[in-house]
Amino acid sequence: MMALFQAKRRNILPGFGLSMGYTVFYLSAIVIVPLSMIFINTIPMGWEPFLNAVTAPRVLASYRLSFSTAFFAALFDGFAGLLTAWVLVRYRFPGKDFLDALVDLPFALPTAVAGICFATLYSPIGWLGQLLSHWNLQIINSPTGIVIALVFIGFPFVVRTIQPVLEEAEQEIEEAAHCLGATRWQTFRKILLPHLFPALLTGVTLAFARGIGEYGSVIFIAGNLPMKTEIAPLMIMSKLDQFDYAGASAVALVLLCISFSMLLLLNAVQEWQQKEYRS
Amino acid sequence: MSQPDTNNSKAPVVNKRISDPQSVQVLLIGLTYLFFIGFIFLPLGLVFTQAFQKGWSFYLESIREPYAIEAVKLTLLTVAIVVPINAVFGVSAAWAITKFNFKGKTALKSLLDLPFAVSPVIAGLIFVLLVGSRTPFGSWLGEHGIKIIFSTPGIIIATIFVTFPFIARELIPLMEAQGRDEEEAALTLGARGWQIFGKITLPNIRWGLLYGMILCGARSIGEFGAVSVVSGHIRGQTNTIPLHVEILYSEYNFTASFAVASLLVFLALLTVVIKNGMEKHFHKNSLHL
């Protein structure tokens, strides 16, 4: 590694000072200074009030709700995303290109629009709400509704991380397994799934991280009942509305720390996977 | 799942890939369609049936009333400012990261992923904490007649934060793949810095740049959480299109709400079509979300 660094040639291209300087200035002004405001607003609180703020029953309930709904939505996206990627890469069928293009819709559609759509679909007089009321199932104003909104939001992350890996997977290995007498299901479980697992994990983690912070698509269907369907970002919002800046920062700090450690963990897992793969 | 294979003794057909049995294929394709119907087609269909529930004239009225027009104007203004600013940053960051080797490159690259891990609400919160009227800096600005939070500059800054990585993340892999050879050749032939950039680099990256700008623009139009925190929801003044949709919806004015939302759906569909067209054109499979 050291040898590589020393061997690299001296760069003769101009513009390093300008581009690097501008990049660092921009990132400081837009990202680092504003984000540090969360710490600056939390530190003067002191330990005791901070703990009180983030362990208040209503706040704890909102964390639990955000994590559990994001978790189940990401899990569901794992299955739906793997299925969709598999079908889009391996099979030919009418409407394939159309579906492939529409995978990106949750990413392009403003979250508020997704929010009002699902809230209306599952309302007691909505298309799906009417249907489900026959079985006394209520989706709106319940955690299930939040999960549905988050499944929509996280879906493209999973499909688009698995798709390229599946496209590049060599089918010769599957043929070899076939020749050796493995069934399709065995081949899938023992060969394809381990190969796809890192991408699947990445996609699911991205969907999960996105789900924890999601706001626009959730608030319409959730009903925002205290202790029941109030998500963590909404707690921040309501503390802000009461001008409780320190409280909002404290709740935000915990949420940020968890999201960042999730992504760091993901990076670590990926590096470990790559090392395993090489050796 | 699949049946035990009984055809092992037969020689495999030349050039025919092994595949799943027809029944499994039909089942899996059916399940995928079911998922798409529930999560994509029904919501899309709903928007248009709701929007036109009271007929064409009501639809046109909803999107032409003064508050809706003000919201469209504010959103267009935001996009027109945010996209060029982030484009300059994206090119600058991609130039620094791909044309030079330096310490801390990985840290810089991971900073570019940061907004994806930050909740939109937190993205709004940090700017309220920085320049809100109750903060020292914000009240100093207020004394000099500058209002950022609950006004247009706040909306623009929050949108910049949420969308700044899109263009850089599009350009970095592209410029990494293109290398430095062409620029170095131009340099040895006597070209100056801006000449190299204008005549070599920019033509090479123009499609990637355009693509990144489309993604950045799409996200700027639709950003809701961050903008909602800093906007203050003042009708006709600090209401973007998504916020206008929210207000109409919370006033139980569903038809008008969906009518305005249908504009956003058109834009989203257009984005998806352009994105796929460009990806097909450049044989690009990866998507940088």
Image (cartoon, coloured by chain):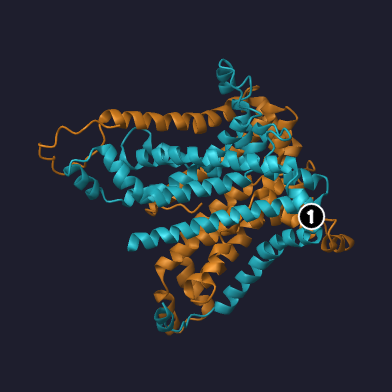
Chain colours: A cyan, B orange
Marker count (numbered):
1
Q: Residue at x 42, y 30 (%)?
A: B33
Classify residue B180 by image quadrant: bottom left
Does residue B23 appear anywhere in the picture? Answer: yes
In-front residue for pair A266/B194: A266
Q: Residue at x 39, y 76 (%)?
A: B181
User: Which quarter of the rendered picture does the C terminus of chain A lie within?
Assistant: bottom left
Percent from the top left, x then y, of residue B22? 26, 30
Residue B183 in the image: above or below residue B127: below
Does residue B72 appear anywhere in the picture? Answer: no
Residue B157 in the image: above or below residue A221: below
Residue placed under numbered mark 1 in the picture: A48
Percent from the top left, x then y, of residue A228? 69, 33
Percent from the top left, x then y, of residue B38? 50, 29
Is A82 on the left or on the right of B77, as rendered? left
In-front residue for pair B132/A250: A250
User: Which quarter of the rendered picture does the N terminus of chain A lie within?
Assistant: bottom left
Q: Amino acid at mark 1?
A: Glu
Q: Residue furthest front?
A: A48
At mark 1, the secondary structure is: helix
Q: Residue furthest right?
A: B143
Q: Give neighbour class at mark 1: few <14, some 14-19, many 20+ (Cα, 10 Å).
A: few
Residue A208 in the image: above or below residue B105: above
